[in-house]
Amino acid sequence: MEPVVLVCGLGQSRSSWDADWVPALVDAGFEVVTLDVPKASDVDGMAAEVAAHIASLGLGRCHLAGYSLGSWIAETLAGTRPELVRSVTCVAGLNETTEWEKVECEYGRDLAALGVPLPRHQALLEELVYLPRSELQDDGRMRALVAERRAPNPDALGQWEAAYRWTRRTDAVARWSRIAAAALAVTYTDDIDSPPGHTRRAAAHVDDIHVVELPGTHLTPLTDPTPTLDALTTFLRSFVSDP
C-alpha cells in the first residue's frame, strides 16, 4: 500500500483524523500515517521535522496531505525535499496570504505570548468566527458547541509564531514554483483564511496542480469531511497504476 502522511493544522490533534479520514483512506487502499503539528516555531523547521519523521519510518516517496497550517508544511516539504514526496494535497491552505490571516495570526501569537490563563470561551470564540451565521443563530447548535470540551493547546505560541512568520513571507511565488510533485488544492467557498480566489492565484505558480472548490468554510474538512475525502481519494487513486 502506498503511504499517505496527514499533517495537522494549528491546534489540531492527530486523533482528529481517526473517525473519518483514516478509515476512508485505508478503505481506499492506502497506508496512513498521522502526525501532530511539529514543535518548531517556523514552517521551514516544521517541514524539516516531518521530513525526518518520514525518513525514520522508511516510507520512501509518500503522498502528503496537510490541513491549514499543515498544508503550508506540506507545500514547503514538497518544494524542498522532492525525493520524499509523490504527491501533495493542500486542504484549506495553499493561497496568497489574506489581510484577515495577517490580523488573525498576529492576534493569535500575541495572545499566546501573554502566558496567562484565558477566558473559558476564548477558544470557542475563535472557532465561531468560521461558522456560518445560520449556525450562530441556532440556539441548540450554540448550546452544543458550548458544551464541547476544548483542551488547551500547549504548543500554541510556537504554532502561532510559525503562522505569523508565514503570513509575512516575501518568497511565496518562488516557493510555489519549486513544487515539482503533482498537487491538489482543496478550497472552500466561504473560507476566510484561504478563499478560492487566493488559492487559484497561488496555484497558477504550481506546474502540476488541480484545484477543487467545495461548499463550506475553513472548518468543513473536519466537520463535514466526506466531500473533501472524495476529492482526495479520487486524486490519490490516479497514482495507483503509475510506476
Image (cartoon, grey):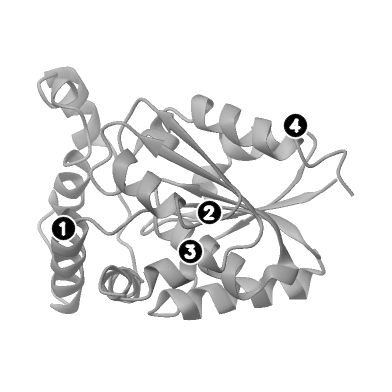
Name the residue located 21 percent from the left edge and 58 percent from the top edge. Answer: 101
Q: Nearer the viewer, residue 143 or 49?
A: 49
Disc 1 secondary structure class:
helix
In this view, 194 is above or below 138: below
Identify the residue position indicated by label 2 in the image.
14
- Residue position for label 4: 28
Q: How far, Cα to Cα, is label 4 from label 1?
A: 38 Å
Q: Earlier in the sequence, mark 3 or mark 2?
A: 2
Report which residue position mark 1 lands on.
99
Q: How many marks?
A: 4
User: Tags 4 and 3 in contact by the CB under 8 Å rule?
Assistant: no
Amino acid tagged 1: Glu
**Closer mark to the observer between disc 4 and disc 1:** 1
Q: Marks 4/3: CA distance?
A: 29 Å
Relative height, residue 32 to residue 48 (above, below): above
The residue where tag 3 is placed is 176
Q: Position of residue 242 (x, y in %)?
A: 86, 44
Give the spatial CA distance, label 1 vs label 3.
20 Å
Residue 94 seen in render: no
Crowd band around label 3 with a 10 angstrom C-alpha radius: few (<14), some (14–19), many (20+): many
Q: Locate residue 50, reporting x and y percent.
A: 60, 71
Q: Name the side, left or right, on which 81 lies relative to 69.
A: right
Query: Type of residue at label 4?
Result: Ala
Identify which residue, 53 or 231, lies in the foreground: 231
Look at discs 3 and 2 and give the one toward the viewer.
3
Callout 3 secondary element? helix
**Badge 2: few (under 14), some or many (20 or more) residues near its Cα, within 10 Å?**
some
Disc 2 versus disc 1: distance between alpha carbons? 29 Å
Q: Residues within 10 Å of mark 4 (few under 14, many from 20)?
A: some
